[in-house]
Amino acid sequence: MEFIADFHIHSKYSRATSRDMDVKHLADWAKLKGITLMGTGDFTHHLWLEELKHTLEDCGNGLFKYAGIYFMLTAEVSSIYSKRGRTYRIHNLIFSPSFKSVDKINERLGRIGNLASDGRPILGLDAAELARIVFDIDENCMIVPGHIWTPWFSVFGSMSGFDKIEDCFEKQTDKIFALETGLSSDPAMNWRLSALDKFTLISNSDSHSPQKLGREANVFNCQLDYKTIREVLRTKDKEKFLYTIEFFPEEGKYHYDGHRLCGIRWSPQETKEHNGKCPKCGKPVTVGVVNRVEKLADRPEGFKPENAIPFKSLIPFAEIIADAKGVGKGSVNVEREYMAYLAKFGTEFNILLKASKEELLKSLPPKIVEGILRVRAGKVNIKAGFDGEYGTISIFDDNEGQKKNEEQLSLF
């Protein structure tokens, strides 16, 4: 069966997350989005784990279920440690097929640091040692380096990471077979590194609120069970892993270089021209994902490996509605229309990915349909994100996006 999966999220027990990041709201919003399989996130946190154990029904195949939505046990661990005289900050996702293995992982990691401090715990633990601990407990677990290009907290981060996966995971490298691209990069950027060809690239929302579920996700056509999904990822099976759903990477918080406090946003070329120093305060700018990819790449832009999994870049439907109407995406009218349109089409991904132009025009205002079609064609305008600030994206020119004729833009 074909289904959409979002493996990387956080619960209400992680910092800066919505109080609605509980099982019920996750399931409700997964249905609205059209997501069949969710990662639980945060299984290292005792209160969240207790809620998961009491709420989820065990399917007996490594997955769990609540109100028609499937869940896989996942967590993210932040490793901050010194190695060969340098400090590294690496985020890794852990996938587990059972609560039994989760309990053992938590018991072992709990000896190293305080798992109760945050849904995403910070441990003074070498990433290679984390992998060894997890795989020794259960070889069917998965370790996936998270948002691999984020400057401050990732395996390739310009401020905190390595130049090679092997340098990070050492003897455990052969057991790592998937990487998470993160919001600020897409697969095409990663294809420029031949060293990454053997890895399966996955994309997830890293969501801190239910409304942002699925902003990045994975589309499979296989059995809904842990073992099958793990094997699809391990073998990079193009017949069963159909494509990933991506942010336009420019919209990510670390796409370009820059210094947010001073309002400096630079392309890699501009950074080079200024020797990496902010002209306002003199401090080094945060080197973003594009620059870092450029530094490690051994292929030109546009190169596509033969075994590459395809991808589709999308903009959330609420943002398309807001842009078409010329209002903020947090507007009450946007939320009202979003829910009304979903009632007609079933799910957000039905609207964004599957409905034909003719079907869309039957139930949506023409300008919103035009917005959807432009996004599908990649015809968008983006001011790249930098140094922790999201990029700004627009589908229509300023004069197009103005709320000139509300009657044309709304069916209500």
Image (cartoon, rainbow, N blue to C red):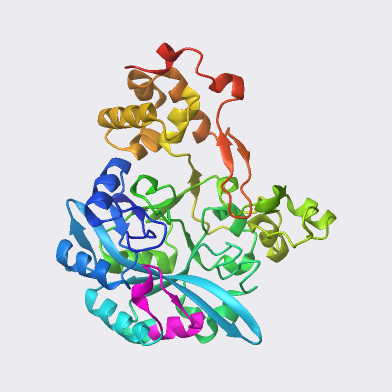
Q: How many marks?
A: 0
List x then y, in percent, for residue 238: 43, 57
Quarter of the figure that contains the C terminus: top left
The residue stretch that appears in magenta: 113-133
The image shows residue 90, relative to residue 220, as above or below, that is below
Q: Image quadrant of residue 31?
A: top left
Viewer-nearest residue: 146 or 278:
278
List x then y, in percent, for residue 349: 36, 39
Q: Can residue 211 be seen here?
A: yes
Q: Image quadrant of residue 291?
A: bottom right
Identity of the residue drawn at 72% across and 59% down? 285
Identity of the residue drawn at 36% across and 76% down? 115
Viewer-nearest residue: 334 or 185:
334
Q: Is residue 316 magenta?
A: no
List x then y, in percent, for residue 59: 17, 64
Q: Is residue 112 left or right of residue 339?
A: right
